Amino acid sequence: MTSQQSRPQSSHRAKRGNYAPSLARKEAISAAVLDIVDASGYDAVTIGQVSKATGIPQSSVLYHFPTRDHLLVGAMESAAQDIAADELDKHGLPADPIIWARDMFRAVLGNRNRLLLEVYLRGLASQPDNPAHGYLLRRGREAVDWWTQLCKQLQDAHQMHAGLDPHTTAVQIVSLISGLMEVSAYSDGSNDERICDDLVTGIRCLTCRGWQEFLAYANNPASGR
């Protein structure tokens, strides 16, 4: 019985051992694509250039990413993971979500090549069989879920009107962010700081933050707020 149990375990370990270098190659490819995008824009991404940058044969690049669109989606996934690791994983939900959203949004707009890639992938996402479709659909749902939880916490902290639906408000905030990103992408970037201010104003309006601050002041005038 012991020998029968050991064989499947050995097979399982072998599969995991083969998976690790494959995952490492995939991550290296995504990172290389992101570097190319940062340096020269998404138009500069080619299978050959990625192969040259990573030292991975073109056949292996195509094994992990069958098309150029798959490469670009992989780059965006890598970028999104970087942001999540830097801003959320250490501390969880931010203490002041509006200020956090503004700072994050300013960072997103500041990397114009990634911003243009994002908008480009949105165009591709209209095709259901394109890899951008599934990726952006999933990411959009995750963003709405995250903001929904945050809106509930804002209500608990009396920083958002109790009569608002957290999910509906989350959808509106995610839509606002998406729209303002496109406004920046279609301009020369000179108004990005104003666009960041527009984001703050928009979130405050959608959550009725000003009304909540008025109520807090009315209940405690000595606070000076």
Image (cartoon, grey):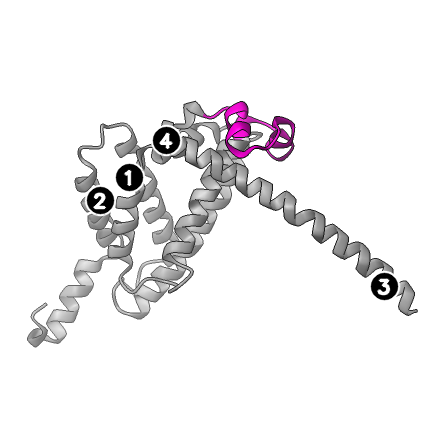
At mark 1, the secondary structure is helix
User: Does 53 appear in magenta?
Assistant: yes
Tell me the amino acid under the disc marked 2. Cys
At mark 4, the secondary structure is helix
The earlier-in-sequence mark between 1 and 3 is 3
Q: Residues within 10 Å of mark 2 (few under 14, many from 20)?
A: many
Q: Report the span colored magenta.
A: 45-69
Q: Nearer the viewer, mark 1 or mark 4?
A: 4
| Left or right for 172, reference 74 | left
Tell me the amino acid under the disc marked 4. Ala
Mark 1 highlights which residue? Answer: 109
Contact check, label 2 and label 1, Cβ < 8 Å: yes
Tell me the amino acid under the disc marked 1. Leu
Gap in Å between the C-alphas at discs 3 and 2? Answer: 58 Å
Q: Residues within 10 Å of mark 3 (few under 14, many from 20)?
A: few
Mark seen at residue 6: 3
Q: Residues within 10 Å of mark 4 (few under 14, many from 20)?
A: few
Mark 4 highlights which residue? Answer: 39
The earlier-in-sequence mark between 3 and 2 is 3
Mark seen at residue 196: 2
Gap in Å between the C-alphas at discs 3 and 4? Answer: 50 Å
